Amino acid sequence: MTRPGGRLDGRSCLIVGGTGGIGLATAERFLAEGARVVVSGKTPEEASEAMSRLGPLGPVWSEQADVSDEDSVIELFDRAVAWLGERLDVLVHVAGISGRRFGDGPLDACTLDGWETVMGVNARGVFLTNREAVRRMITNCPGENLHELTGLRGSIVNVGSVLARSPAPDYFGTIAYAASKGAIESLTRAAAARYARDGIRINLIAPGLIETPMATRAVNDLAIRHYLHTKQPMAGGPGSALDVAEAALFLAEPASRFLTGVVLEVDGGWSLSDGQLLNG
């Protein structure tokens, strides 16, 4: 029996990009639900700051990793799985970048450096972490308790973007970013199809505009705030990191054991709404 509220009791979880924004909120929720958690960030400072916030909440460890580097990802999984107790139940991949400062933009303006940098972090990063997670999870013994009657070996939750399916070119016209998130969606569904037979679930969250450090420019832009009032009508503005964290918790926990290959749009109505331009 799990304790009340212990939706992840006994689960060993790695959150890549778990030191800030959506990832940090997800780590907080996972710890509150009884999980053992490793979070990774790109710098030692990020890892240290996350530990100071997460440490009092439960069993947690932080690591530094570059998700675009194969050796760094493998080393991250080696250290994380060793700390977690030689089993990985859940991977949540949140880490990603916005590429405007690297040259991302509309198709006619996007530079080759911008394209390759964004694809190298966002798409390659998910490929590397998901590949390593599957390699670990496939050796797990299938669950046999009440909450795992389907014999699950693990759950992967990737974070993409609503922009992969619902473009907004006036304010969010970055072609490499959208393409990288589309690649993540295709990877998620193709891998979910292949590994369902092995009891590994792979799902995707596609958030709308969420108030995080990476979205500061957009969130503070008055024209975009006006646009969001009708584009994300359920919030009348940006969503919160907790909105996405709750979705990640659901896709990771045993209650969603019959879901795989799902694209869950956590967007406050973005994909269903027009959005009014400030001068439109």
Image: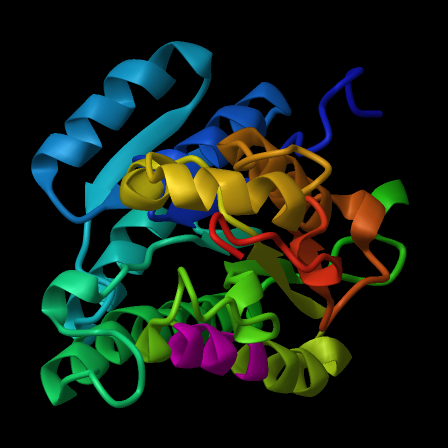
Residue 145 visible in the current orientation: no
Q: Is residue 188 left or right of residue 254?
A: left
Q: Position of residue 146 (x, y in %)?
A: 90, 42
Residue 218 in which image quadrant: top left
Q: Is residue 269 left or right of residue 237?
A: right
Q: In terms of secondary structure, what is the magenta stretch mainly?
A: helix
Is residue 159 or residue 162 the one in the foreground? 162
Q: Position of residue 242 (x, y in %)?
A: 56, 30
Is residue 4 or residue 178 the one in the foreground? 178
Q: Residue furthest top?
A: 56
Rendered position, 238 above or below 119:
above
At x 49%, y 25%, the residue is 28
Rendered position, 238 above or below 195:
above
Span colored in magenta: 178-186
Residue 5 visible in the current orientation: yes
Residue 259 in which image quadrant: bottom right
Q: Is residue 227 left or right of residue 50?
A: right
Whether 42 is among the magenta residues is no
Q: Position of residue 235 (x, y in %)?
A: 66, 33
The C terminus lies in quadrant: bottom right
The N terminus lies in quadrant: top right
Rendered position, 131 above or below 100:
below
At x 46%, y 17%, the residue is 58
Residue 199 in which image quadrant: bottom right
Rendered position, 219 above or below 86:
above
